[in-house]
Image (cartoon, rainbow, N blue to C red):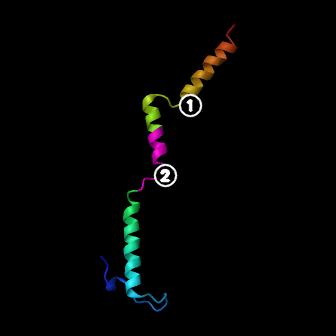
């Protein structure tokens, strides 16, 4: 996967053993590939909201306004 040429020879960095550096590069690459399959933390919440919108069980501002208007007519009938 990675070759020794992939590791830059730097005197300012830590003294890397080439085999250790290759192992680290491959581990990071494997971890990055595995992370592609992990869902975003908000994906479940978005799916839940989408289902509630489709089912009509999501309380929206319009529903709250409509209920408030109906309640105001019940408690304060027009004279």
Q: Secondary structure at mark 2?
A: loop
Residue 50: numbered disc: none
Mark 1 vs mark 2, CA separation in Å: 26 Å
Q: Residue 17: give x, y in percent of width and height.
A: 41, 88
**Residue 33 to residue 14: above or below:** above
Image check: 5 left or right of 50? left
Question: Mark 1 vs mark 2: which is more N-terminal?
Answer: 2
Q: Residue 67: give x, y in percent of width and height.
A: 59, 22
Q: Which residue is mark 1?
A: 61
Total marks placed: 2
Q: Secondary structure at mark 1?
A: helix
Q: Which residue does the image show at 58% across and 27% down from the upper left?
A: 64
Q: Nearer the viewer, residue 11 or 29?
A: 29
Q: Which residue does the image show at 45% across and 47% down from the upper left?
A: 43
Q: Residue 33: give x, y in percent of width and height.
A: 36, 64
User: Which of the 4 image quarters holds residue 34?
Assistant: bottom left
Q: Which residue does the image show at 49% across and 49% down from the upper left?
A: 42
User: What is the residue that sits farthest to the bottom in this orientation?
Assistant: 11
Segment tinted magenta in the rendering: 38-48
Q: Which residue is mark 2?
A: 41
């Amino acid at each position: 996967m990675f070759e020794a040429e992939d590791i830059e020879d730097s005197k300012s960095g830590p003294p890397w053993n080439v085999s250790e550096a290759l192992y680290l590069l491959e581990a990071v690459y494997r971890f990055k590939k595995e992370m592609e399959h992990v869902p975003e933390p908000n994906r479940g919440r978005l799916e839940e909201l989408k289902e509630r919108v489709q089912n009509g069980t999501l309380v929206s501002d319009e529903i709250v306004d409509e209920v408030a208007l109906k309640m105001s007519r019940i408690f304060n009938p027009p004279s």
